[in-house]
Image (cartoon, helix red, strand yellow):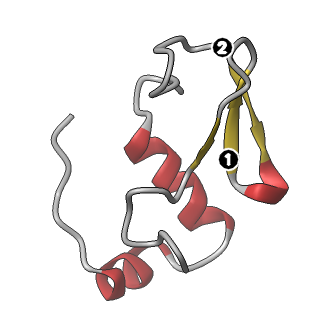
């Protein structure tokens, strides 16, 4: 998937903060739906309070923000 380069400031100006920002980040990361980077399967569920997906079979958790400009923020 090809995405545009966006700075943190540009992202905030375009998407604001909170849920709208999180929703857009999810669309960028998994435009075809969630796929576990560890096992490659697509069966998982979102844990909203922690902003991560958990794979149902391997139980690995994947943060929406990991590997992005928002990691450690």
Q: Secondary structure at mark 2?
A: loop
Whole-percent x, y for residue 54 in the image: 71, 32
Q: Which mark is residue 27?
A: none
Q: Name the residue rendered at 75%, 17% in the picture.
A: 56
Where 19 falls versus 9 (above or below)? above
Q: Which residue is more in the foreground, 18 or 51? A: 51
Q: Name the residue rendered at 54%, 66% in the picture.
A: 21
22 sits to left or right of 25 = right
Which quadrant of the view contains residue 46?
top right
- Between discs 2 and 1, the one toward the N terminus: 2
The answer to whether the residues at label 2 and label 1 have Cβ atoms under 8 Å apart is no
Where 3 falls versus 1 (above or below)? below
Q: Name the residue rendered at 20%, 49% in the picture.
A: 3
Q: Which residue is more in the foreground, 1 or 69? A: 69
31 sits to left or right of 64 = left
66 sits to left or right of 57 = left
**Residue pointed to by mark 1:** 52
Where 29 falls versus 55 (above or below)? below
Separation (CA) of disc 2 from disc 1: 14 Å
Q: Secondary structure at mark 1?
A: strand
Image quadrant in which the N terminus is located: top left
Whole-percent x, y for residue 34 in the image: 53, 27
Which quadrant of the view contains residue 58?
top right
Whole-percent x, y for residue 49 in the image: 84, 58
**Residue pointed to by mark 2:** 43
Q: Name the residue rendered at 17%, 65% in the picture.
A: 5
Q: Which residue lies most toward the right here?
A: 49
């Amino acid at each position: 998937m090809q995405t545009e380069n966006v700075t943190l400031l540009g992202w905030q100006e375009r998407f604001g903060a909170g849920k709208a920002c999180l929703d857009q980040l999810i669309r960028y990361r998994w435009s075809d739906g969630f796929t576990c980077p560890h096992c490659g399967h697509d069966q998982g569920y979102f844990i909203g309070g922690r902003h991560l997906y958990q794979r149902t079979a391997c139980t690995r958790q994947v943060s929406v923000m990991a590997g992005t400009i928002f990691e450690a923020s």
